[in-house]
């Protein structure tokens, strides 16, 4: 019986060792690109490309969290309480057509189409850290424009002191709005708020994209706010209304659990959550925990907003 030997490989045909060792990451990325929304849960397709100018002055120098992690490990309770629920169920959200009503104590109230907003204001890419109250954090290259740009266009009146954000109320698109969470029900729609000077701060970003593409459903499409020195739940997602008020607006988590979630919710390692410490955090993709920084590391930029305030009382 004649046995044929396989032909010898030349050196330039041998797979590079680095490529071989990174094959698992490549397979995960390939899966994320090929699966459709709702298939196999965690995998997430890439969105439409979205161009923006990088704002290095307001960006962290740390490497971003991997896209796969940032789009499959999320808090978005309108979809459910588990971290993989948003990616698994986000196909139910229809982010177009979409409008945002801006009203309240303003001289020029207006309802904007979300795509109109992206044309009105130059888009920037900023790398921000976002820390969640449960003790984990991510570094994400967000794409958006300063909330201040929008607020100045509608011209707040002298009575405006606060800004309230309201998320879409639609249980057909948001299955989590049909169920109780952690044994109690949030008062839907989800609402959040900022003091007007916080909302006008240059770091506060109205966000329409991330990682060079249109914002994914599970990360708050089509438009959300990102307030990087506060815990993540302050950064309201899928916004349909921005209202300026004279009084501090009631917010979803503060109404549900006032002992645990204050209005300000600045990242403060000296103020523990009643059920866990806030002194350390785990950056997604890292094994070791790191010390939590006051104001999530943005203290130099925002500390002056709270001069004279007792930040343990106003937590």
Image: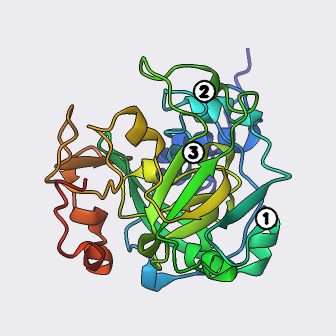
Q: Residue at x 30, y 58 (%)?
A: 266
In the picture, measured across the screen, residue 118 lies left or right of residue 302, that is right
Q: Nearer the viewer, mark 3 or mark 1?
A: 1
Which residue is label 1 attached to?
Answer: 111
- On the image, the x and y values in percent for residue 127 come to 47, 69
The single residue placed furthest to the right in the displayed view is: 97
Which residue is label 3 attached to?
Answer: 71
- On the image, the x and y values in percent for residue 133 come to 33, 44
Can the viewer see residue 292?
yes
Q: Nearer the viewer, mark 1 or mark 2?
A: 1
Q: Residue at x 28, y 68 (%)?
A: 297
Most foreground residue, 143 or 80: 80
- Spatial CA distance of label 3 from label 2 is 18 Å
In the picture, measured across the screen, residue 142 lies left or right of residue 113, that is left
- Spatial CA distance of label 1 from label 2 is 27 Å
Q: Residue at x 35, y 64 (%)?
A: 229
- On the image, the x and y values in percent for residue 201 come to 45, 77
| Precedes in sequence: disc 3 or disc 1 | 3
Q: Residue 174, located in which quarter of the rendered image?
A: top right
Which residue is label 2 attached to?
Answer: 176
- Badge 2: how crowded within 10 Å, few (<14), some, or many (20+)? many
| Precedes in sequence: disc 1 or disc 2 | 1
- Image quadrant in which the N terminus is located: top right
Q: Secondary structure at mark 1?
A: strand
């Amino acid at each position: 019986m004649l046995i044929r030997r396989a032909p010898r490989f030349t050196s330039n045909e041998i797979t590079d060792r680095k490529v071989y060792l990174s094959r698992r990451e490549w397979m995960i990325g390939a899966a994320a690109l090929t699966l459709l929304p709702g298939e196999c849960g965690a995998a997430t397709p890439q969105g439409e490309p979205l161009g923006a100018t990088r704002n290095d002055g307001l960006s962290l120098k740390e490497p971003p969290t991997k896209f796969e992690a940032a789009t499959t490990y999320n808090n978005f309770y309108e979809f459910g309480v588990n971290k993989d629920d948003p990616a698994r169920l986000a196909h139910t959200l229809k982010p177009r057509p979409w409008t945002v009503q801006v009203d309240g104590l303003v001289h020029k109230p207006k309802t904007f189409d979300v795509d109109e907003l992206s044309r009105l204001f130059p888009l920037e890419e900023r790398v921000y850290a976002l820390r969640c109250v449960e003790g984990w954090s991510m570094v994400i290259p967000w794409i958006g424009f300063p909330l201040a740009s929008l607020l100045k266009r509608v011209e707040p009146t002298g009575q405006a002191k606060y800004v309230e954000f309201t998320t879409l109320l639609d249980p057909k698109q948001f299955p989590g709005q049909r169920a109780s969470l952690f044994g109690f029900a949030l008062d839907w729609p989800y609402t959040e708020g900022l003091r007007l000077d916080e909302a006008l701060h240059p770091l506060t970003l109205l966000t329409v994209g991330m990682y060079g593409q249109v914002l994914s459903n599970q990360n708050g499409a089509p438009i959300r706010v990102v307030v990087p020195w506060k815990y993540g739940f302050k950064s309201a997602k899928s916004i349909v209304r921005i209202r300026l008020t004279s009084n501090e607006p009631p917010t979803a988590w503060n109404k549900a659990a006032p002992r645990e979630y204050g209005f300000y919710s600045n990242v403060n390692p000296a103020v523990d959550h009643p059920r866990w410490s806030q002194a350390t955090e785990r950056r997604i993709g890292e094994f070791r925990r790191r010390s939590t920084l006051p104001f999530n590391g943005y203290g130099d930029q925002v500390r002056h907003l709270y001069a004279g305030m007792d930040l343990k009382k106003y937590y």
